Image: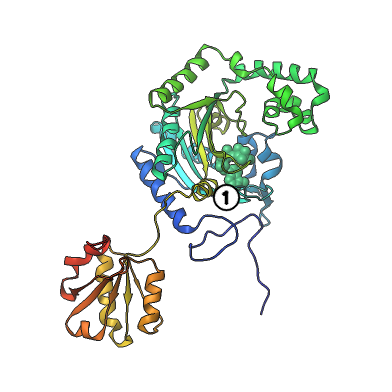
Amino acid sequence: MADKINAVKGMNDILPASVPRTDRLPDSALWSWFEQKVRQLLARYGYHYIVTPVVEPTALFVRGLGEVTDIVEKEMYSFTDSMNGDKLTLRPEATAGIVRAMVEHNALYNGPLRLWTMGAMFRHERPQKGRYRQFHQLDVEALGFPGPDVDAELILMVRALWRELGLVEGEHVRLEINSLGQPAERQAHRDALIRHFEAHADVLDADAKRRLHSNPLRILDTKNPAMQAIVEAAPQLMDFLGEESRAHFDAVRSVLDAAGLAYRVNPRLVRGMDYYNLTVFEWVTDQLGSQGTVCGGGRYDGLIGQMGGKPAPAVGFGLGIERLLLLIQELGLPVPSAAPAAYAVVPSAAVLPQVMVVLEQLRAAGVSVLQHAGGGNMKAQFRKADASGARYALIFGDDELARGEVTVKSLRDAGGVQVARSLSEVAAWAATLQSPAPNT
Ligand code: ATP
Ligand code: MG
């Protein structure tokens, strides 16, 4: 046998639940259930679907995310197109590409837009539970809206998604918010921060020293325990916010308060990208170890202008799909099964043409039916029917077919209630397969 070729480290297959695997990655039924919930929910809020390329010019992310960010400094999959020398990058996040597309197509000409996309992102990180090199995001962006109403709408929409999925806010996932103010306010805070950290230069690690003058705000994000005390004592941006920034933040908060959504104002929430201003938020969980952020986002009023577009405000978030589905699995929340409504037992190959016509009619009526394939005796076929999780077995025996009937047998009650159904009136009884037998 030839050597096997395996997937790239940190890049995963999403497989049907029936395929055994040792990692705890979500199965494809959970995955598509989530996608379906997302599609329905976002339509209810009036968000439109968009698809942008997975590969973009490297310059897009360097300009958009900021040079001194984890992503641009060390996580991007960048390469040179060997055909023409172009510098390209596999997208590490979705916002920059969506903004590029909006600017390129002058899409905001007719007014603001609410958009969403879902797809693979790539970051060269150390793979671990909840952190991969290829991962997937739901990404939602509202472009051209100054807020604060839309900021709050996005946050409430995520809460609505939690509820759809069976997650309880405050218990399974918690909301943290902050305001980053405006550039001038950040500048004043930045100067104060630099003075503060310079006064404690002896405690700074190498990373912090490097960032002291390039991006001191990111020092607040450090995970180094030795630096916690000076981070704790650092001047807070909130104290540098002007009246308008405060009013914006208060307006977001009053919507959340009115909607009964509890949150924590976390003054140290700064987010990983440079483009944010005013509102930033994260939904976090305690159940996934250090990979606790399930969803993060905020306002980025400067980015569209920075990308060469006519300046326009914007706000959005990214949600990590693997992390979220891991959480749902970990909590053991009820998720729908991918089991068919019925399993067709076919004792003799000779009757297949007649049977398959009936199965087509059932599926056209909206019933999911798994057809036994590959022969085998009745006992073996019933074992398969049980294992499929189907609610009913359809038995196409020679006697039944001779009478123009099929036997419908319940697989979910001990007695195995059976009824005969007419093959000439499939549409009349198809719907009964969608619900449990009357006595179960
Ligand atoms: P973290 O602090 O965990 O590295 P981040 O701030 O880099 O997260 P964002 O860029 O805000 O993450 O991306 C939004 C969401 O995408 C995150 O909250 C997380 O759920 C998910 N995510 C980010 N990086 C990864 C990854 N490498 N693997 C899986 N999910 C990820
Ligand atoms: Mg990260």
Q: Quadrant of ligand 2?
A: top right
Disc 1 designates what residue? 135
Dot 1: within a 10 Å radius of its alpha carbon, few (fewer than 14), some, or many (20 or more) residues? Answer: many
Query: Which residue is at the front of the view, 126 or 8?
Result: 126
The quarter in which the C terminus is drawn is bottom left
* Location of residue 78 in the rendering, given as x and y in whole percent from the top left corner: 67, 48
Side of 241 where 1 appears, left or right: right
Looking at the rendered image, the quarter that the N terminus falls into is bottom right
Q: Quadrant of residue 302?
A: top right
Residue 297 sits above or below residue 217 on the image: below
Ligand 1 closer than 8 Å to label 1 CB: yes
Q: Is residue 435 left or right of residue 216?
A: left
Judged from this view, the residue extending furthest toward the right is: 202
98 or 187, which lies in front? 187
- Image point 58% across, 44% down: which residue? 288
Q: In the rendering, at what x and y percent does residue 43 appear?
A: 35, 42
Hey, which residue is sitting farthest bottom in the picture?
350
Residue drawn 28% across the image and 70% down it: 415
Q: Secondary structure at mark 1?
A: strand
Whether residue 79 is visible: yes
- Residue type at mark 1? Phe
**Is 236 or 82 nearer to us in this picture?**
236
Q: Is residue 32 above or below residue 210?
A: below
Residue that appears at 62% across and 42% down: 289
The answer to whether 92 is drawn above or below residue 209 in the figure is below
Image location of residue 109, percent across then percent down: 42, 32
Indicate the position of residue 133 as horizontal and vertical percent values: 63, 51
For residue 404, which quarter of the picture?
bottom left
